[in-house]
Each structure stands twice: as structure tokens, then as C-alpha cells.
Image (cartoon, grey):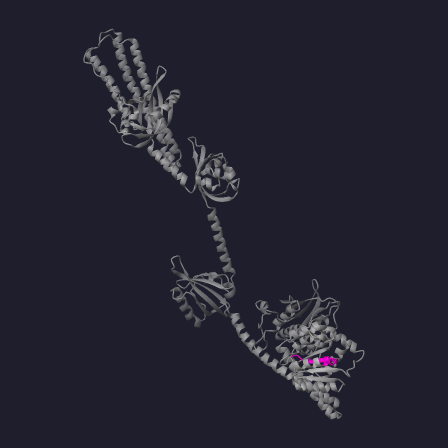
């Protein structure tokens, strides 16, 4: 250590008396105090270095911790070497002290020049070694007086201040240091005197260099006779460490990831702002009051994490769920490390948290969208395929199993069009190349491909290119729909349209034929009544029979081209089934089909149209007969009826034929579907049956019976009350519509008691056909009735108004439905709105005549107003019967 003055070797012998014993003792005490200060500096240096190094080393990973843990041990070894050096120097001083004491004890005179030379040489060597040792320290070592004068210092301090070493010693410290200021030092002096030590980091700004450095200082008081006379200081330059800490602090404060330090007990020691925000707190202090255990959504997760950290030391991206201050749950990735002390005990946990709540939400949404797309493709009825640039299948949707019988795996990697029809392959390959080369963005193609069972199916595909993120075509995607059935249906529709055109032609022809047929029937009746000659009567009867036959043919043509509107009445199913079997009895007997029919007693009635229900059951019976006849020469038809669940009744028709194939059974009710040979059926029978049964509010189903054959079950809602007795059908097996109307049935019952007189009644006949008007006029006039005729609806209105003005209204109006100008429906509406409608008698004397089947509008009028309707062609006797019913109601 350098001092302001250095010893000067004396040139003269020892001046004055020899040093006294007290003087030597005082010198020994000073020397001992000096060595203590030196040792204190060294111990402080070693301790500070060890503590700082240990804090840094302890935070390092395990391997680096083992490598750097030897640093404090090295410091201790250095201290030990220095202590040995000091011990050696102390021995030299002790030797010198013994030499001086020996001279005193021998009572010799002043020492010789050789003795002084030797003494001064020992002292010089001791001081130089001590100074060299202190100057070798990189840390600053110095001693200050209480007024700030530098009494001693090593060369590192002078170099840091940027001044020569001789100018540094003996001057005040504030001459070299701008910060901390002298005033700040004086303020801290009083407290230092009391405590006699101080440690901390000081920011130092040197005057000459202008540089700012940070020093970790340890100050120890220097006392003389109990009074503090100065301070010794050891200062370690921690500027780099301070800057690193500053950078770490800035990083700690600005990181988006949450950083935390906690104790094993769950106490939060520190947290960065990102973690405070992540957990929903406004201040760090509020978060530090919370225990980590309270943040975990699952209370058992924290102990498991601690146990895993204790075992492994580090956890990387461990997914945990935490609860924010507002109660919301967030998902985080936790990367944490367990910090241990020298004994291996965990003293704290430190780590980072990354909030992945939004990521998990996006991943969940993406998964849902992918799942939705996958399910959509899997359940989409069309075939979805993806083809790569080589023209090979990269993806095939599962619907191919239902459409073509293959599994997706069977087509993976196969080339497009391998199973296509040879005539369609060239077009498919050309379209594929145009789409893959970007020549076409969208294309459609119709092609034929082979099913796994060998049949050919017709498909229509829509094709588009697939692009990657850079817009490059990586393949194509196509959706294909099976158009086989649609193509077949198109052909059937074309055929149906032809049939509809024929039906319209037939309806028009039949309507036009009904008027002359009515005239023929009417005139034949009149001639038969007036003919006195038996031969002439027989010929007229023959004409009437043939006209009736022609009228039946016309009626059947109308029924085929335009089915009649259903007229529902309570019907007995037992009776209807019996009549239907009787109607088809001859055909069943000829084809050796036995019938097992057992009516059930107490079966409730159903509300329906007997003709339509008979058509349904007759169709089922005919199908059963044909199924038996196609398999064997004889068979059994079993028909049963009974009560169903709730207010329903059921009818079953079962045959002992071959039954139906599994792939045919679901399609038997489809329009135009038929298993019969071409020309043997249209495929409309069962579809019409289903439509009629649904119109009656029922259901029909078909299965293969366990004992063999097909089993059809018809379910219908039961009607309230008992079943109405069915009237006798006509020669064609149909029930007359007038006979099914309750009002007509009641009138017939009243007519059975006695006929109503027609003489003197006035009737208006409205028809655009002159022959019809003449026929009706002649037929009614012969029975004593007054008949007026009108050729149009407008003329009829004038006649009605004139009769009303003369107070002689018509007793009945017979009116054709279809007429040019004012039709029969419109005439009825005009008259119904007039004064005659107020009495309620007008509706009872209006009778419609029509050559066509009654349409929906006319049927509604008939049902709501109770008017009669007579179907052309009719006989005069039918018209007389209708008039009698009208006048008797």
C-alpha cells in the first residue's frame, strides 16, 4: 500500500537514545492493527465475490451449476494462499522486531550502519511485497479519513479515476469523483459512525473521464482508541453485471410471457407485468398476496406439478388451467425450474407462462370445422373425390360404398377413369388435363362407370382445380352424382307426358261424346216408351244397351284420364273386401289361387271413398295373384282385417309367392318402378295405392312374411259410429256417386213410400247443345211438366228474372256445367246471390248436368249447398229420378 511519504534511509548513526519498551509496544500494536485491516479487506473481497458468484451460479442449469460451483471454492483457496503469504510476512516482521529487541536487551550502543541497513532492507522488502499484493487486486482498495482525504489506495482506484497514482494519494476524494457528491457523503457520515460498517451498490461518476460505473462497496470503520478516524473500503466493479441486470429487468418487464418466482409453499415472490395482466390483476402487489394454489382450477394439479419438478428439476410446456381474478379460466403452457440450495433442498420455483387460451379456442374451432367438413363429406350423398396432378385418386368419400360398391381404400392411388365406359374414357382424360393445366376453372361431364356388381351407372360430375398457398394447381376436386335413376325417370316422365297428352285427348273426346250419347240414350228411351210394335221395341232396346255400353266406355276413359274427386262416407271394410274379392273371383279361380278371408266381427267403419279403397285392395290382390302365378301353378291368398293401436283398423294381404328381393323392397312404392317385364306393367299401381291411402289419412307398408311371400299392410283411421251399408254396384263393379250421398240416400228412402208428382211443375233447361235441350224437353213434357229452354247462361238469367217478375218462379233448373260465356258454376253463383236464395229453397231445385267428371270447384258447391249433380250420359228416367228427389227434399 502506497502512502504519501516513504521511509528515507538514515546516513548517520542512530541519533539519540535507543527506543524504549513502551515505544516498541506501541509499534507492535500498530503493526497488528495494520495486519488486521489487510486481512479484513481480503475477507470482505472473498466474501463479496463468493456471494455474488453464488447467486448467479444457483440460477444456472444443473450441469452449469456443477461446473461453476467451484468458483467460490477457488476464492476460498485464494484467500488461504494470501493468508499464508501474510503469515510469512508476519514472521519476517517478527524477526525484525526480535532483532530490535535483542539490541535493546544487550544494552549496546547505537546500532551500526550495517545493522540499520539490514533493518531498513527488511522493512522495505516487507512494504514492497505488501504493496505489490494490494496493487494486483482488480477491485478498488482504499482508506479515507473522515474529511474524505485518500490516505491509501491501490493503483486500480487511480486508473479508474484516470489520474496518476502520486496525485491521487493525499487529496480529497471529491476532487476525482463527481457522484456521489461530498454533501451526500457528509449526510451518511453520522450514521456510518454509529454503525461502523456499510455495504451496498454505489453509482460513481468520475470527473476526469466522465464515465459512470457501479461498484459493490463494503466499508469498515478505522478506529483509534475507540474513536472512528476513517474508513477502509473494498469496491468491486459491478457495472457489467448492473447493465446485465438492467437489461434483464427491461426484458423481465417487457416480455409478453408471464414470468414468476414462487416458494415451494406457493408464495409468489415476484412476477412481471405480463403475468399480472394475464391473471387479471391491476397491481403486482395484489397478485403477490395470492397463493399459487388458489390460482389453479384443478386443486390437485399444483401438488402433481411440484412432485414432478422435485423429481425432474424442470418441466417444459406443461399445460395447466388457471383462474383469473374475474373468475374466467385460461389455459397456459408452464415452463418451470426448481432452484435448490447447497443441501439440495428446493428453495423456490421460477418459470414462464404462455397464455394459449385463444390458441386452444382456435384449435377447437378449427377441429370443429374440420369435423364438420369431414362429417359433411362423409354424409354427403354425392361422391367427393380429390385427384392429384398425376390423375390418381388422393381422396375418395365413403359414399362410394353405397354408390359403386367399392371402399375408399380400393380406389386410393388408382387412375381416374379405369372403370369408366370405354366410350367415355377419352372425354374424361381430356377434361382432367384441361382442369389440371389451368385451361378450365370449372367443368361438368356425364359419364358411365361400372358398379362392383358389374352393372353400369350414369354419373354427372362437377370438376374444379385445387390450389396451394402460392396459387399453384396441386390437383382437382370433383363431386359426382348418380343420375341413373333420374335418367330412367326422365324416360318415364317423357312416356308419362305422352300418356298425359293421350289422356287429355281422351278426356276431350269423351266429353264431346257424352252429349251425343246422352241424346242417343234419351231418344232410345222415348222410342221404347212410344213403340207399340214388339220388334221395334226390341230393336230400340238393343240400341239402348249398346249406347249404355258406349257410355260405360266413355266413363272409364274419363276415369283413366282424370280421376274423380273422392267422396268419403263411412265404409265397412269387411263388406268392401268381400265385394272386391267377388269382383276378382273369376280370375283367382282360373289361376288356381285359393282365398282365405275371414271377416272380423265388430270391426269399426272407416271414412273413405269406396271406389278408391276398392281400387287399392284390388291392386294388391292382383299383384299377389301375379306373384303366385309367376312362381308356381297354384297358391294361397290370405286377407285379414282387424283393430289396430288406437282408433285405427288394418287390412293385410299376404301371398305365398317368392317374396321380394332386399334391394327391391325399399323401391316398390316409387313411381314407374316395376319388376315386371316390359309391356306387363307401368310401375304406377303401388304408387297410386300409397297416394290414395295417404289421402285417406292412412299408411301402407310391405315386408317379406316370415313364412314366405309378400305381406302388405294397410292402416286406416276408424270412423265414428257404425258402418253404412254399401249399395249394390253397377254393371262395371263401381258404386254410383249419387247413391253414396247421404241426402240422396235419404230421398231414396222417402221415395220408397210413394212417388212425388211431377205434373204441372215448371222446369228451366240450360244447355248449349240443342239435342240435349230437345231431348229433355220431350222427355219431361210427356210427364206433364212445363219445360223452358235456354241455350246460354245469359239467356237463363233473363228467363229467371222474367219468371220472378211474373211471380211464377221455376220449380227446378237443369243446367250444364261447361258452357261458352256464362258457365253453369257462374250461373249458380249469380242466382245464389239473388233474392231467391234468401228462402233457402233455391239450392234445393238446382241440378247440375255434366259430360265431364265433376271437378273440385263443382264438388265443393255440391257439398256445401246440397244441389244435385247428374252425370252425362244419362237416361230420361235418371233425370226424372233426380227431379223427384229434388221435389221430395
Decide which of 242, 608 is in the foreground and name it. Answer: 242
Task: Tell me: 144 left or right of 781.
Answer: left
Reply above or below: 266 against 90.
below
Q: Quadrant of the C terminus?
A: bottom right
Residue 450: image x %, image y %? Answer: 48, 69
In the rendering, at what x and y percent does residue 311 appear?
46, 37
Is 176 left or right of 483, judged from the image as shown? left
Q: Is residue 739 above or below residue 137?
A: below
Front-lying residue, 285 or 724 = 285
User: In which image quadrant can residue 216 be found?
Assistant: top left
- Which residue is at 76% across, 92% downward? 532
* Observer able to see residue 595: no
Q: Please state, as top left, top right, bottom left or bottom right, where the N terminus lies in the image.
A: top left
Specify start and end residues of the magenta stretch as a single range: 803-817
Q: What residue is drawn where x is 36% and y is 27%?
A: 48
Q: Which residue is more in the foreground, 227 or 641?
A: 227
| 143 relative to 717, above or below | above
Question: Most extreme residue toward the left, as rendered?
Answer: 11
Percent coordinates x, y for residue 771 in the rendering: 67, 87
Q: Is residue 814 magenta?
A: yes
Q: Is residue 882 magenta?
A: no
Residue 131 position by quadrant: top left
Amino acid at each position: 500500500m502506497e502512502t504519501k511519504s516513504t521511509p528515507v534511509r538514515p546516513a548517520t548513526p542512530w541519533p539519540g537514545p535507543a527506543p524504549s519498551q513502551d515505544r516498541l509496544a506501541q509499534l507492535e500494536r500498530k503493526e497488528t492493527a495494520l495486519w488486521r485491516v489487510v486481512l479484513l479487506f481480503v475477507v470482505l473481497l472473498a466474501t463479496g465475490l463468493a456471494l455474488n458468484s453464488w447467486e448467479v451460479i444457483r440460477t444456472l442449469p444443473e450441469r452449469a451449476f456443477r461446473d461453476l460451483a467451484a468458483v467460490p471454492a477457488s476464492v476460498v483457496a485464494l484467500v488461504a494462499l494470501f493468508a499464508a503469504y501474510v503469515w510469512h510476512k508476519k514472521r519476517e516482521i517478527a524477526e525484525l522486531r526480535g532483532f530490535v529487541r535483542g539490541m535493546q536487551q544487550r544494552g549496546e550502543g547505537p546500532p551500526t550502519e550495517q545493522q540499520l541497513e539490514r533493518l531498513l532492507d527488511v522493512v522495505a522488502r516487507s512494504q514492497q511485497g505488501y504493496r505489490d499484493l494490494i496493487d494486483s487486486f482488480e477491485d478498488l482498495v482504499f482508506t479515507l479519513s473522515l474529511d474524505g482525504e485518500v490516505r491509501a489506495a491501490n493503483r486500480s482506484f487511480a486508473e479508474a479515476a484516470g489520474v496518476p497514482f502520486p496525485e491521487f494519494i493525499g487529496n480529497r476524494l471529491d476532487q476525482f469523483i463527481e457522484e456521489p457528491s461530498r454533501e451526500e457523503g457528509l449526510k451518511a457520515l453520522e450514521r456510518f459512525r454509529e454503525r461502523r460498517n456499510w455495504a451496498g451498490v454505489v453509482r460513481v461518476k468520475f470527473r476526469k473521464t466522465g464515465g459512470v460505473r457501479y461498484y459493490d462497496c463494503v466499508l469498515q470503520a478505522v478506529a483509534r482508541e475507540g474513536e472512528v478516524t476513517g474508513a477502509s473500503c473494498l469496491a468491486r466493479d459491478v457495472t457489467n453485471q448492473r447493465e446485465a441486470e438492467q437489461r434483464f429487468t427491461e426484458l423481465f418487464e417487457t416480455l409478453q410471457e408471464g414470468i414468476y418466482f414462487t416458494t415451494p409453499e406457493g408464495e409468489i415472490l415476484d412476477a412481471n407485468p405480463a403475468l399480472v395482466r394475464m391473471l387479471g390483476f391491476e397491481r403486482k402487489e395484489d397478485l403477490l398476496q395470492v397463493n399459487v394454489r388458489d390460482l389453479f382450477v384443478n386443486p390437485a394439479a399444483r401438488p402433481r406439478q411440484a412432485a414432478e419438478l422435485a423429481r425432474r428439476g424442470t418441466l417444459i410446456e406443461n399445460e395447466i388451467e388457471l383462474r383469473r381474478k374475474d373468475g374466467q379460466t385460461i389455459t397456459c403452457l408452464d415452463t418451470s425450474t426448481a432452484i435448490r440450495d447447497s443441501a439440495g433442498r428446493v428453495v423456490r420455483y421460477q418459470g414462464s407462462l404462455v397464455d394459449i387460451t385463444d390458441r386452444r379456442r382456435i384449435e377447437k374451432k378449427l377441429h370443429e370445422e374440420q369435423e364438420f367438413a369431414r362429417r359433411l363429406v362423409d354424409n354427403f350423398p354425392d361422391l367427393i373425390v380429390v385427384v392429384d396432378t398425376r390423375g390418381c385418386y388422393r381422396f375418395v368419400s365413403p359414399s362410394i360404398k353405397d354408390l359403386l360398391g367399392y371402399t375408399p381404400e380400393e380406389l386410393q392411388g388408382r387412375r381416374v377413369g379405369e372403370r369408366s365406359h370405354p366410350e367415355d374414357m377419352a372425354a374424361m382424360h381430356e377434361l382432367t388435363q384441361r382442369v389440371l393445366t389451368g385451361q378450365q376453372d370449372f367443368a361438368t361431364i356425364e359419364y358411365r362407370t361400372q358398379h362392383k356388381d358389374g352393372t353400369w351407372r350414369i354419373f354427372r360430375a362437377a370438376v374444379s382445380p385445387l390450389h396451394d398457398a402460392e396459387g399453384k394447381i396441386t390437383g382437382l376436386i370433383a363431386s359426382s352424382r348418380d343420375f341413373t335413376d333420374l335418367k330412367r325417370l326422365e324416360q318415364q316422365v317423357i312416356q308419362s307426358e305422352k300418356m298425359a297428352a293421350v289422356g287429355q285427348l281422351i278426356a276431350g273426346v269423351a266429353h264431346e261424346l257424352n252429349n251425343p250419347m246422352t241424346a242417343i240414350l234419351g231418344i232410345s228411351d222415348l222410342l221404347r216408351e212410344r213403340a207399340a210394335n214388339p220388334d221395334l221395341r226390341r230393336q230400340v232396346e238393343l240400341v239402348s244397351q249398346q249406347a249404355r255400353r258406349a257410355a260405360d266406355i266413355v266413363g272409364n276413359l274419363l276415369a283413366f284420364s282424370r280421376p274423380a274427386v273422392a267422396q268419403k262416407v263411412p265404409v265397412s271394410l269387411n263388406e268392401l273386401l268381400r265385394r272386391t274379392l267377388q269382383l276378382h273371383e273369376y280370375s283367382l279361380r282360373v289361376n288356381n289361387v285359393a282365398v282365405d278371408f275371414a271377416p272380423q266381427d265388430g270391426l269399426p267403419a272407416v271414412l273413405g271413398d269406396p271406389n278408391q279403397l276398392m281400387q287399392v285392395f284390388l291392386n294388391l290382390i292382383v299383384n299377389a295373384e301375379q306373384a303366385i302365378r309367376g312362381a308356381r301353378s297354384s297358391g294361397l291368398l290370405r286377407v285379414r282385417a282387424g283393430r289396430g293401436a288406437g282408433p285405427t283398423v288394418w287390412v293385410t294381404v299376404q301371398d305365398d309367392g317368392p317374396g321380394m328381393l332386399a334391394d327391391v323392397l325399399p323401391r316398390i312404392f316409387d313411381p314407374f318402378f316395376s319388376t315386371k317385364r316390359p309391356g306387363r306393367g307401368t310401375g304406377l299401381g303401388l304408387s297410386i295405392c300409397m297416394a290414395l291411402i295417404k289421402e285417406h289419412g292412412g299408411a301402407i307398408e310391405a315386408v317379406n312374411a316370415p313364412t314366405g311371400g309378400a305381406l302388405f299392410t294397410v292402416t286406416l283411421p276408424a270412423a265414428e259410429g257404425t258402418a253404412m251399408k254399401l249399395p249394390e254396384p253397377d254393371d262395371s263393379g263401381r258404386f254410383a256417386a249419387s247413391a253414396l250421398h247421404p241426402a240422396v240416400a235419404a230421398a231414396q228412402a222417402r221415395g220408397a213410400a210413394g212417388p212425388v208428382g211431377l205434373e204441372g211443375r215448371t222446369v228451366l233447361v240450360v244447355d248449349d247443345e240443342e239435342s240435349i235441350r230437345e231431348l229433355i224437353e220431350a222427355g219431361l213434357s210427356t210427364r206433364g211438366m212445363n219445360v223452358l229452354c235456354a241455350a246460354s247462361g245469359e239467356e237463363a238469367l233473363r228467363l229467371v228474372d222474367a219468371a220472378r217478375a211474373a211471380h211464377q218462379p221455376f220449380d227446378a233448373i237443369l243446367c250444364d256445367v261447361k258452357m261458352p260465356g256464362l258457365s253453369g258454376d257462374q250461373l249458380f253463383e249469380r242466382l245464389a246471390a239473388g233474392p231467391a236464395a234468401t228462402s233457402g229453397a233455391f239450392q234445393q231445385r238446382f241440378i247440375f248436368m255434366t259430360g265431364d267428371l265433376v271437378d273440385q270447384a263443382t264438388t265443393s258447391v255440391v257439398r256445401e249447398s246440397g244441389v244435385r249433380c247428374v252425370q252425362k250420359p244419362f237416361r230420361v228416367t235418371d233425370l226424372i229420378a233426380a227431379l223427384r228427389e229434388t221435389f221430395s227434399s
